[in-house]
Image: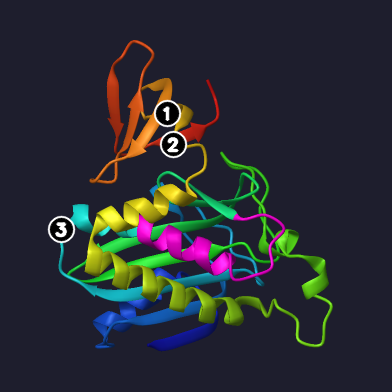
Amino acid sequence: MKFFQYENLGSTNIEADRLFEAGETPPFWVRADAQSAGRGRRGRDWVSPKGNFYGTACYSFEGSPQEAAKFSFVAAIAVANALSAYSLTEQPSLKWPNDVLMDGRKIAGLLLETKPGRLLIGIGVNLVSHPDGGNIPATHLLSHIDPAVLDTDEPEFTGPEGFLAILSAALDRAIRKHMAYGFSATRSDWTALADGLPGPVTVRLPNENFTGRAESLLENGALRVALSDGTIRDVHAGDVFFGTD
């Protein structure tokens, strides 16, 4: 595994794509101390101040867009497992489709892009700071690490470079498991970490909102929601808010 690290980039996804086009062979990682044009899901800006983690993993990929989308669940599992390597005051959880939470607050975001021959997995993790606002309140890793492990001769937290070492190993393990055992294994691991599933949920789509009970993650990655009138809705994209009636 190769690692390319920079002080500043517009976007780690764009740089990873450029490296692939220039002949770099996957898998490899691109990490930047800061980004000037970070992007989140659905074209949203990803605030990227220095001190947090901004990276993109590039893997060889020849599958369909539907298969590629399942790697968002793989990546979310990897981020949760990487966070769990620290001495935390509470454990991370996952929210459909690919948000990683700590104490119900968003700590990470993912952006997957597929192009011929490659899959780009962009990951941003709030390590030392977090932005205000947004659909989900945010948080950062240092707020959830046991203070006792920070004030030692060998502190547990060593910043973005240290986090990359942990995350790259976690993602590689999760991808290998997904490739070996399929989405059924990934779905099981994701569900074990899921926040509010099963449970009440509000779904916001571009042209409608509805409430119901989130039942399960389906084999195709959709969220199955049962409405009060017995109707079943399978949500493939949209904003979901758990724990609301």
Chain-order first, disc 1 or disc 2 = 1
Question: Between residues 163 and 77, which one lies in front from this camera angle?
Answer: 77
Decide: marks 3, 1 in contact (CB < 8 A)?
no
Question: Between residues 64 and 222, which one lies in front from this camera angle?
Answer: 222
List x then y, in percent, for residue 233. Answer: 29, 26
Give the crowd class for mark 1: few <14, some 14-19, many >=20 residues within 10 Å: some
Give the crowd class for mark 3: few <14, some 14-19, many >=20 residues within 10 Å: few
Decide: marks 2, 3 in contact (CB < 8 A)?
no
Which residues are the magenta region? 73-91
Q: Secondary structure at mark 1?
A: strand
Q: Mark 1 highlights which residue? A: 203
The answer to whether any part of residue 37 appears in the image is no
Give the residue drawn at x 62%, y 68%: 52
Q: Secondary structure at mark 3?
A: loop
Q: Mark 2 highlights which residue? A: 239
C-alpha distance separating marks 2 and 3:
24 Å
Report the quarter where the N terminus lies. bottom left
Q: Mark 3 highlights which residue? A: 64
